[in-house]
Amino acid sequence: MGLSALTVSVALGIIGGNTFFPAIATRTARGVDFSRSTLLRAGIVLYGLRITFQQIIGVGWAGVVIDLIMLTSTFLLAVAIGTRLLKLDRDTAVLIGAGSAICGAAAVVATEPVVRAQAHKVSTAVATVVVFGTTAMFVYPLLYPVLAMSQNAYGLFVGSTVHEVAHVVAAARSVSDGAASTAVVEKMLRVMMLAPFLVILSGTLRRAQETTTHVQDRHTGPRFTIPWFAVLFIAASGINSLHVLPNAWTAALVQFDTLILATAMAALGLRTRVSAIRRAGARPLLLAAMLSGFLVLGGYAVNRAVPLLLLHL
């Protein structure tokens, strides 16, 4: 039917998460959470075996510039709209902005120690970015025929605008493996921008606090999570580029990787609850929806304009 294993897995997971899963959640929670976190990252690391440094170089400066523009504009838009127009508290706006701009739930969790947000605000931000990231996974392949983009350009578009790494893989693989390879490389560049983003955010919040209180708290230094799976992804790509492993081993690991990613997507679907969406309220969902619209429309414009501008420089 043209559906990837990842798309089918997350759809079945969402159905299960809102039907039978609550009855068995207490007995299976550790396995589900292990699958949607550890297995997901392991799957992304192994995905590097499908990619070579030649492909990474092929993304070029255009990919880097596109990621920087999308990350910065999406986050600043989230804070401005969230706090001024929708009257959300700063922490919620920052968390939703980080999740939308960088890498979904992982960015939300990584940003929490910096903003020191309350637990329910983190849950709200995670729920919103997972919902719209999952939606993007289904919508982007439907848009592909009308975008007038090559598979490589579509991969850059997906990698620079879709929320979760797993959603990027699923949305791009629905078109082709080549688009998926480009999309994952572009997305990993985005993920690797998480650490410097958190350092800058920490310094900005500290300066804002000092301006407000005129007191410097020596315990508010930058605290951030290094996305080690992104580093290991590059290492796996290096192994593939150097042809260290026999082709049969590489093919077997790629098949195993598909199984791991499908398991992670199913687990992610199991944790996507309609009740959590209702508890999030209308304003956080509205902010996430507006950011998703910007990622599609603004991201399409940026992905069209940047390569042309660099071509003329």
Image (cartoon, grey):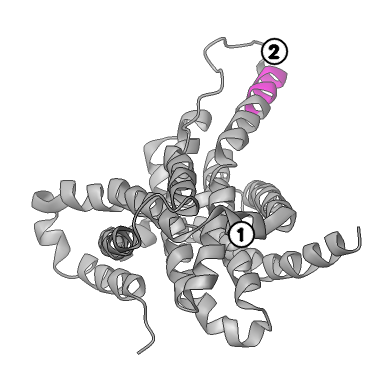
Q: Give the residue at x 52% y 29%.
A: 114
* Nearer to the camera, 191 or 44: 44
Q: Which mark is residue 160?
A: 1
Q: Secondary structure at mark 2?
A: loop
Vertical placement of 248 versus 11: above or below?
above
| x and y percentages locating residue 155 in the rendered image | 58, 68
Say whether residue 208 is magenta: yes
Q: Quadrant of the C terminus?
A: bottom right
* Residue 162 can be seen in this image: no
Say whether residue 160 is magenta: no
* Residue at mark 2 to residue at mark 1: CA–CA distance: 39 Å
| x and y percentages locating residue 141 in the rendered image | 51, 79
| x and y percentages locating residue 149 in the rendered image | 67, 79
Q: Give the residue at x 58% y 82%.
A: 144
What's the amino acid at mark 2? His
Mark 2 or 1: the one toward you: 1
Q: Secondary structure at mark 1?
A: helix
Magenta segment's dominant SS is: helix
Which residue is outermost to the right?
313
Q: Quadrant of the N terminus?
A: bottom left
Q: Which mark is residue 214?
A: 2
Q: Give the residue at x 29% y 58%.
A: 249
Q: Which mark is residue 276?
A: none
* Residue 207 can be seen in this image: yes
Q: Which residues are magenta?
A: 205-212
* Nearer to the camera, 170 or 23: 170
Q: Residues within 10 Å of mark 1 (few under 14, many from 20)?
A: many
For marks 2 and 1 on the same chain, the one whose residue lies earlier in the sequence: 1
* Nearer to the camera, 38 or 232: 232
What's the amino acid at mark 1? Ser
| x and y percentages locating residue 103 in the rendered image | 50, 51
